[in-house]
Image (cartoon, grey):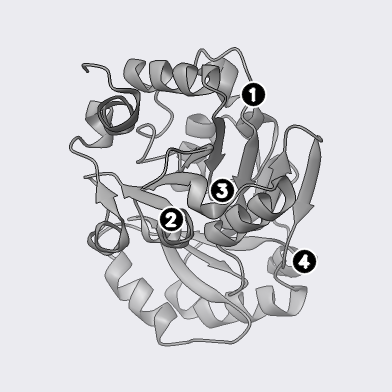
Amino acid sequence: MREPRLVIADIDGTLTVVQNPLPELSVRAMKELHARGVQLGIASGRQVDTQMKSYPARWGLDFPFDVLIGMNGGQLYIEKTETMHEYYKLSSATLKEIIDMMAPLNLNPFLYEGEGMLCQRVDEGVKASILRNGIAAREAGDISELYAHDNAKILFRVDEKRMPEVFAYAKAHPSPNYRAFLTQTTMLEFEDPRVNKGMGLLEYCRISGISPEDVWAFGDMENDNELLRDAGWGVCLSNGSEETRRIADAVTEYPVTEDGFGHYMMDHLLNHQS
């Protein structure tokens, strides 16, 4: 493996437990990487918005991230030029196709609208998300509002015990217009089949002149697989899914709850006792 010119990581389950601060060792590692001239980025299923751009300050870093990949690769924000690139949104017709296909399961579809969420109904899961993420949610007056405009993706929050059944149902209803995948054990998402975090990474490498071989990428779930595959060195957190651990070049010695990213960077690149 080469020393990286860019280190990029998923957020939840990789850098932090949901909405927790960035652990101390990871903060140190990022500061040292930045001081060495290594670019830094995050790649998330969330949209690139004010909240995502605020992560460095919230985590005690005094510099912005060089690249933000949002919507699992559907959005790419480049800090140096302050430019946003968007790719392959789901059409209004495809959103309706997904909603109609999933309707027998009586779930609550939602999508990102501006810097908030638009959902079929404001249920307990949506209320918890509002508190957890600090974003607003709006209930659709009619289900057709959810497919009135093209959008990067549509999501369904599902009870963990029910998810195997729901995911199997989605997989049994394939379409060339979308792909279904899990980003958490309780979150099912649909996006254009061409979109993934690896695609976003390769686009950034093409635009910025960095070879993918000079990238270290970190993730924990199946929506990180292409990110890890397309980077020169892909690392899965030890708490990651079986599939993602299998496709990774390496697995961290510690889980996210024990600052797995920070330990790995210190022990395998920065050469410090952690």
User: Circle 2 sits on which residue?
Assistant: 224
Q: Is residue 173 visible?
A: yes
Separation of disc 1 and disc 2 at Cα? 22 Å
Q: Is residue 234 above or below residue 226?
A: above
The amino acid sitting under disc 3 is: Val
Q: How far separated are the C-alphas under marks 3 and 2?
A: 29 Å
Tag 3 residue: 122
| Residue behind mark 1 | 64
266 left or right, relative to 57: left
Q: Earlier in the sequence, mark 1 or mark 2?
A: 1
Q: Is residue 218 left or right of residue 87?
A: left
Tell me residue 158's x, y (percent): 39, 59
Among the 4 quarters of the image, the one containing residue 80? top right
Task: Tell me the number on the disc at residue 150.
Answer: 4
Which amino acid type corresponds to the residue marked 4 in the rendered image?
A: Asp
In three-dimensional space, the C-alpha distance between marks 3 and 1, rounded to whole angstroms, equals 34 Å
SS category of the residue bearing label 3: loop
Q: Is residue 119 visible?
A: no
Tell me which label, 3 or 4, sits earlier in the chain.
Answer: 3
Disc 4 crowd, CA 10 A, few/some/many (<14, 14-19, 20+): some
Identify which residue is drawn at 22% across, 27% down.
258
